[in-house]
Amino acid sequence: MSEKQDKRELFALLKLMRKYNLKQTEDLLKQEANLTEDLDEELLAKTPPPLPDEENPDMLFGIYEDLCNFIEESLDIYKHELSMVLYPLLVHIFIKLMDCGCEEKAHKLIEEFGPQQLYYYQNDIKVLSEIRKVSQMETCDLITALKNEKFTIRISRDSLSLFKRHTQDKRFDLVNQIVSKYFHFDLYEGAARNKEQCEATAGAITGEAKRTDNKIRVYYGLLKDIDFQSLNTPPDEEEEVDGDGIDRPKKKKPKKDPLFSKKSKLDPNAPPYDRIPLPELKDADKMEKMKAMREALKRVPLGKNSLPSCCFYTVLNGSGTVTCAEISDDSTMLALGFSDSNIKIFSLTPSKLREIKSADQLKDIDRDADDVLVRMMDDRTAESARNLYGHCGPVYRCAFSPEKVLLLSCSEDSTLRLWCMHTWTCIVVYKGHLHPIWDVRFAPHGHYFASCSMDKTARLWSTDSHQPLRIFTGHLSDVDCVQFHPNSNYIATGSSDRTVRLWDCLSGQSVRLMTGHKSTICCLSFSKCGRYLASGSSDNRVLIWDLSHGQLVAQCKHTAALHTITFSRDGTLLASGGLDCVLALWDFLKLIEDYSISSNQSSHNPEVLEGESYLLRSFSTKSSPFLNLHFTRRNLLLAVGFYKS
């Protein structure tokens, strides 16, 4: 029998003796007093502590309503910054009421004041309204984030002084306690921000980014191109003179290859080439890069008066089944992922997909031949499409390696798979994520790849190791998309916590935190110069960020959620497509020119350009949302979507 049960039975016996006026000894009276004290403490431990008189539910309602009225009556110059405190304060009062067992009062608070919050917090208000028990709060990402992280509000010194003076004059001790524990005011000197400036960087779960989050230097420049001339240098022809001194006819000097005529300049903002170990290129890889550069010489320059042609690939009978689409860098192959765990590879050229010959047949091949790779492929196995089976859940993303030999895929089954395009088989299964993996991308220089998952992390991998090299932690919800920087030294991630982060692959540190989206970030794309990052979200907007300072440059609006964005090969246009079945082309070159002129480098109130004036053209499909956009090396725009009946 337990000790607690013994105490309860003895206490019941003493009560029975008192009922029948039985005589109790002095020892029994002392024992009864001790038992009463022990049982009272046990009862108190099970009962939530009551709120103090000044913090009871009715008083909390009055305090919050008073703050709303105070902010509404404030001068317009301070009103918009002061209003930023209302949402996090409402959430923390709700949490306090729930913790104290006042569930009905907590929901009444949300019902009364929730609709008054800004539009981009309404989904969070809906999440709070569905919480009925304290146990449900432990599994809510929103509440966990707000309890563990301080809500950041960028505010002028004058606005903060007004707020503190009001709470002190009214003796709102609870408000002051919440503010000191759960708020971080990022102070700046100067005039308070207006409504547009406040909303431009607001919307994330934990408020705005602190200015100190974006102070670390970022090497956003591009790496120096490899020296192709050493691989294939045209020999210089010298004048030949015979032994008798008789001049022979001069041979014409060969025309200089335009590929070698341009010397690559070292970007002052570029990282050292050996900052992270990059794989040494084989001769075959160098030849492939040389081929890409020759194609780039024939690139069509794009601009306001020279828009790209667009070729749209429609997947029929794919509504509800096709989950992702990816085109290889040389625009020769298309990979589709399906909800039934299948991956299908299509050839976009007359050349069919062949399989490597058997080991016995490979013995007879001349290994020194220039076309040895072509000879290794078996023409009898040529097909226009290939199927890859191995995942046991929907495939959410496919990614081709730069040399087009490997393919990566990620799935709901929490695994990454590496496929060989020569044997059409899975050669590695990478395990490490704990939940479904939403995105995976190869580095532009190969060897490395990055993934992101529902487990709130992104990870850096290499093809020669089955363990992740880096684990990037800091997001407060699902990490939905990932993208490599053109110099392979950084990766960008977009999350359901409505923030975009830039991570250093060398240190694993977050070097940029960018806030401004009002919903989940769905896609990312770096500009060709490496300085700017575009992010598309289900809030129907594309935001352009300057990585040198981490500040917002411009916003471009769609009519529905964004699904794919990409820059043209010459970096002059930005193309975006989404669930509104609209392809939009934006004049990125003009946008950056205007930003360079008007930029004041002020981190607390940057001027955000409106993208409507930079929209060059929009094209609508009949009923086909966009899955992927891709510019070829000659600036032809390829699009992939599925027909939605």
Image (cartoon, rainbow, N blue to C red):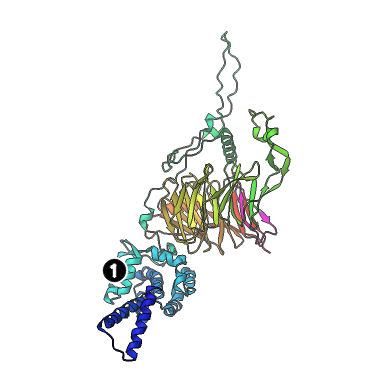
In-front residue for pair 359/262:
359
Which quarter of the figure is the N terminus placed in?
Answer: bottom left
Considering the numbered disc 1 on the image, is that residue within a helix, a strand or a loop? helix
Image position, residue 195 (x, y; %):
41, 67
Residue furthest out toward the left = 26
Q: In the displayed structure, would residue 147 be above or below residue 247?
A: below
Image position, residue 19 (x, y; %):
34, 90
**Res. 107 image quadrant:** bottom left
Task: Residue under label 1, please give it.
Answer: 161
Q: Residue at x 50, y 47 (%)?
A: 467
Q: Is residue 315 magenta?
A: yes
* Residue 638 appears in the picture as rendered: yes
In-front residue for pair 508/31:
31
Image position, residue 471 (x, y; %):
46, 51
Residue furthest out toward the top = 244
Residue furthest out toward the right = 380
Image position, residue 46 (x, y; %):
39, 76
* Residue 574 appears in the picture as rendered: no
Q: Residue at x 53, y 33 (%)?
A: 228
Q: In the displayed structure, would residue 8 be above or below residue 299?
A: below
Q: Amino acid at mark 1?
A: Ser
Instruction: Report the magenta stretch's main SS.
Output: strand
Which quarter of the figure is the C terminus placed in?
Answer: bottom right
Q: Is residue 485 magenta?
A: no
Q: Which residues are magenta?
A: 313-327
Q: Dot 1, crowdedness within 10 Å: few (<14), some or many (≥20)?
A: few
**Res. 564 image quadrant:** bottom right
